[in-house]
Image (tube, rainbow, N blue to C red):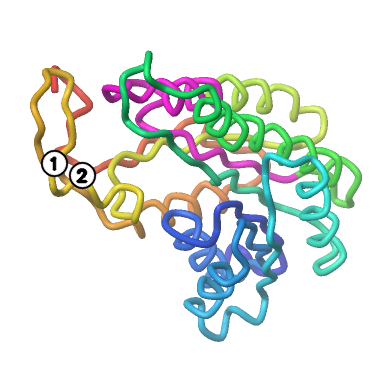
Amino acid sequence: MSGDGKVAIVTGAGSGVGRSAAVALLAEGYSVALAGRREDALQESIAEAGADGARALAVPTDVSDPASVAELFAATVRAFGRLDLLFNNAGTGAPAVNIEELLFEQWQTVVNVNLTGVFLCTQEAFKVMKGQDPMGGRIINNGSISAHTPRPNSAPYTSTKHAVTGLTKSTSLDGRKYNIACGQLDIGNALTPMAARMKDGVLQADGSVKPEPLMDVNNVSRAVVYMASLPPDANVQFLTVMATKMPFVGRG
């Protein structure tokens, strides 16, 4: 298996894409540190992995807090000795309200988790990966279809996901001297608790409300495993995985 002897951190691992990715990486042979706000949710993810969960570590983490992020990486190295893969997955959204009605605190919460959290985890990953032997590793950022095209009333989420694209490019460039690869996985309509409402109908750009196609979240975790499996001299810079018929390409 491609992950035998390797170590990964997955943020936002207590549900949805993060849980699916953590379970898939464990099945691939990785030792995995699962990060998230709620330890009970992290333990549920580990239980879902079955026997592979013996190689898992639950680390309650607030990715928007520098001290909490530093402890996540320190705990991972204490438990497993190194770090080969970081999946920056933790994310949140704001209420879908008109931009003039959005509270500053709602905006700031999304920025803190979706952007600052990715930066803080990337920074700590660099510190670990450049100092280990062999040097280097891989970072995969969870972007979004919203890193390309917004939904109505999604300014905080869309803005942060566009910013993650810039951070992915900078990380990919700055990581070269340390043998650190960085790529981005842009996901569209994976069936998770966050996206489940789409099957009942969501606001479209033309003002109508329509249900949208969804895909199995395991399609995303398989993409994570593939990106992670590449040798150090190869990288998937950007990869889009989406429900085949969701509104994205074309004019709706």
Give the CA separation, mark 2 to mark 1: 5 Å
Q: Tell me which segment is drawn in magenta.
A: 137-164
Is residue 70 found left or right of 42 in the rendered image?
A: right
Q: Which mark is residue 5?
A: none
Q: Which residue is mark 2?
A: 198
Q: Position of residue 32 (x, y in %)?
A: 65, 65
- Camera-side residue of 47 and 208: 208
The residue most toward the top is: 100
Amino acid under disc 2? Met
Quadrant into which the C terminus falls: top left
**Is 138 part of what is drawn in magenta?**
yes
Residue at horizontal 20 percent and vertical 44 percent from the top: 198
Give how far across and how far down residue 184 sits, in percent. 51, 34
| Three-letter code for the amino acid on which mark 1 is drawn | Gly
The outermost residue toward the bottom is 51
The residue located at (68%, 49%) in the rendering is: 62
Q: Are marks 2 and 1 in contact (CB under 8 Å)?
A: yes
Relative to 153, does residue 202 appear above or below in the rendering? below
Q: Nearer the viewer, residue 125 or 114?
A: 114
Can you give x and y, in whole percent of width and height, for residue 129 in the image? 82, 45
Residue at 52% x, 80% y is: 47
Image disc number at residue 201: 1
Q: Residues within 10 Å of mark 2 (few under 14, many from 20)?
A: some
Element class at badge 1: loop
- Quadrant placement of the N terminus: bottom right
Residue 101 relative to residue 225: left or right: left
Whole-percent x, y for residue 233 in the image: 66, 38
Residue drawn 66% across the image and 31% down it: 116
The crowd level at tag 1 (other Cα within 10 Å; few <14, some 14-19, many 20+) is: some
